[in-house]
Image: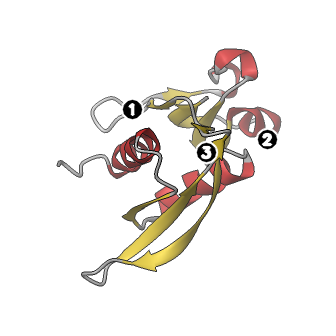
Amino acid sequence: MSMNDPLGDMLTRIRNAQMRGKSTVRTPASKLRAWVLDVLKAEGYIRGYEQATSAAGHPELEISLKYFEGTPVIRELARVSKPGRRVYSGTRELPQVRNGLGVSIVSTPKGVMTDAAARSANVGGEVLCTVF
């Protein structure tokens, strides 16, 4: 598996684990991944995550997935900005997901946040992914 897109890899791991109904999934640790997970947790899409260590001794993040009546809370998790095609957006152009039912996660100069938070902070940035 190519690790040119560590964040995309994490999103795929979450999607795959949910399809199998797993309660947790692990991903190699990185600041960006943790920041994205912080937003997912704050928005209620995951239970949370904690630091862990792989068998080989590498730092990992163990993500606790969230289900409602047996169905994953995250219905859709899509990578927007990719290493080969970065997607940046000004405050006014920040994409709305499903008329505001979902969120875009944006990496801004003021940190990683939802599109709504970025709008109120009046900052734009790289649109990492959308969640619904």
Above or below, 28 relative to 42:
below
Which of pointers 2 and 1 lies earlier in the amino acid sequence?
1
The CA span between labels 3 and 1 is 14 Å
Q: For the point 46% across and 52% down, which residue is it? A: 22
User: Where does residue 92 sit, x and y in percent of width and height?
Assistant: 70, 20
- Return the residue at label 2: 121
Provide the secondary structure element on which disc 3 rests: strand
Q: Residue furthest bottom?
A: 57
What's the residue type where badge 3 is placed?
Thr
The CA span between labels 2 and 1 is 22 Å
Which of pointers 3 and 1 lies earlier in the amino acid sequence?
1
**How does the figure colour the protein chain or chains?**
secondary structure
Foreground pick, 19 / 96: 19
Q: Image quadrant of residue 86? A: top left
- Return the residue at label 1: 86
- Return the residue at label 3: 108
Above or below, 82 relative to 108:
above
The CA span between labels 2 and 3 is 10 Å
Q: For the point 41% across and 48% down, which residue is it? A: 17
Q: Residue furthest top?
A: 99
What's the residue type where badge 2 is placed?
Ala
Q: Residue furthest front?
A: 69
Task: Estimate how packed mark 3 is, as few (under 14), some (14 to 19) or many (20 or more) residues with alpha carbons within 10 Å.
Answer: many
Q: For the point 23% across and 52% down, which residue is it? A: 3
Q: Which quadrant, please, contains the C terminus?
A: top right
Residues at discs 2 and 1 in contact (Cβ within 8 Å): no
User: Where does residue 75 sit, x and y in percent of width and height?
Assistant: 56, 30
Task: Estimate how packed mark 2 is, as few (under 14), some (14 to 19) or many (20 or more) residues with alpha carbons within 10 Å.
Answer: few
Foreground pick, 57 / 2: 57
Q: Is residue 112 visible?
A: no
